[in-house]
Amino acid sequence: MSELLKTQKCPHCSYEVDDSQAEWDEGHHNVTCAKCGKDYIVVTHYKFEGFEVGNKCDWCGELANELSHPHMFDMAIGKGMCKDCWDHDREVYKGSYGEDIGEFKPIRMEEKPLSDNDTSNVSIIE
Ligand SMILES: [Zn+2]
Ligand SMILES: [Zn+2]
């Protein structure tokens, strides 16, 4: 791989393509230079930065590090609510019902059943 450019430049005349016209999609692009009219190829590369994983809030659908059980006014069994949604709801219910649903309480990891603890039934899968 040759050195990557930060701007899309024509290899013939060095005409620099404006960012708004550049080929941002990953892969090969056939381009005709707007200045000199010659064809060239642009290969757009993206560096893989890694995965970000987390729980999905059942209300806003956003990634959340911590989820809480739903509060008393929105009891949906088995669903998880993020802190943003909780704080939002807290304000809403405080304002319109005068009820405080309390602080956001994340579901603790320890509450989830851990199969690691079950040492009596360990089988190695090959
Ligand atoms: Zn050119
Ligand atoms: Zn949410």
Image: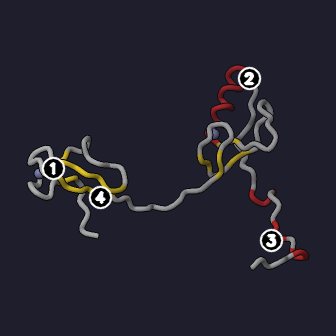
Pick the quarter of the image with the C terminus. bottom right
Number of marks drawn: 4
- Local packing at callout 3 (Cα closer than 10 Å; few below 14, some 14-19, many 20+) is few
Percent x, y for residue 29? 29, 52
Q: Nearer the viewer, residue 28 or 87?
A: 28
Q: Point out the tag, 2 or 3, that comes first from the N-terminus.
A: 2
Q: Point out the tag, 4 or 2, that comes first from the N-terminus.
A: 4
Q: Secondary structure at mark 3?
A: helix
Q: Quadrant of residue 111?
A: bottom right
Is the Cβ of the residue at disc 2 closer than 8 Å to that at disc 3? no
The residue located at (66%, 43%) in the rendering is: 57
Question: What residue does disc 3 label?
Answer: 116
Q: Quadrant of residue 74?
A: top right
Q: Point out the tag, 1 or 4, that comes first from the N-terminus.
A: 1
Q: Is residue 89 above or below residue 33?
A: above
Percent x, y for residue 72? 80, 33
Closer mark to the observer between disc 4 and disc 2 = 4
Q: Amino acid at mark 3?
A: Asp
Is the Cβ of the residue at disc 3 closer than 8 Å to that at disc 4? no
* Residue at mark 1 to residue at mark 4: CA–CA distance: 15 Å
Question: What residue does disc 2 label?
Answer: 98
Q: Residue 43 has which mark?
A: 4
Is the Cβ of the residue at disc 1 closer than 8 Å to that at disc 2? no
Q: Is residue 77 above or below residue 114?
A: above
Would residue 55 appear left or right of 19 to someone viewing this image? right
* Residue at mark 1 to residue at mark 2: CA–CA distance: 61 Å
Closer mark to the observer between disc 2 and disc 3 = 3
Q: Secondary structure at mark 4?
A: strand
Question: What residue does disc 1 label?
Answer: 16
- Local packing at callout 1 (Cα closer than 10 Å; few below 14, some 14-19, many 20+) is some
Percent x, y for residue 90? 68, 32
